[in-house]
Amino acid sequence: MTNHEIKVNFKEYKSITDLDKTAHDLCLEAVNAMKTSHSPYSKFRVGAALLLESGKVILGSNQENIAYPSGLCAERVALFHWGANYPDDPIVAMAVTANTDEFELLQPTASCGSCLQVMAECEKMQGKPIETILFCNKGPVWVMDSVASFLPFLFFEDGLLK
């Protein structure tokens, strides 16, 4: 038997005001994206903003549907829009935030497993990592250099590409 240990590294900041201007502005775009959230059932609004290499910003928000699980997370809304419209303009960074009137969020909310898998595939497609910034109103900001920080065992099977 061999025992293995996996460590996850990420940066933590007190607030988005401690980030550089580019990251700070991207976070504000994610907050803006939450305004288009359709979340009447969970009342949990999520906004995502992608910064592309060209400087273009793509927004996404969660879109719920009464016929669960027909909705879609903010991250995938933004990532699928990128893949359909700008696949040759690599994603440099992604900011994700959430809010609800039901309770106070005290730390960032990580993306779900489905979103992480899509993020991982986007990284693989573009051949570069996507810096990911997670934050909420009053809690810390977490910055990861790559999706591999979330999913050390990414699902990729090159045989499926045939």
Image (cartoon, rainbow, N blue to C red):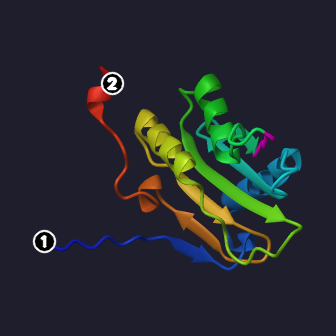
Residue bearing mark 2: 161
Q: Quadrant of residue 12?
A: bottom right
Q: Is residue 90 above or below residue 2?
A: above
Image quarter (top left, top right, bottom left or bottom right) of the C terminus: top left
Instruction: Say which residue appears at 49% left-offset and 38% top-offset.
Output: 122
The amino acid at mark 2 is: Leu
* Pick the front one: 85 or 39: 39
Mark 2 to mark 1 CA distance (whole Å): 32 Å
In the rendered structure, the answer to whether residue 97 lies left or right of residue 146 reads: right
At mark 2, the secondary structure is helix
Residue bearing mark 1: 2
State which region is magenta: 62-66
The amino acid at mark 1 is: Thr
* Pick the front one: 85 or 65: 65
Residue 109, position in %: x, y?
65, 65
Q: Residue furthest front?
A: 67
Instruction: Say which residue appears at 72% left-offset and 42% top-offset.
Output: 68
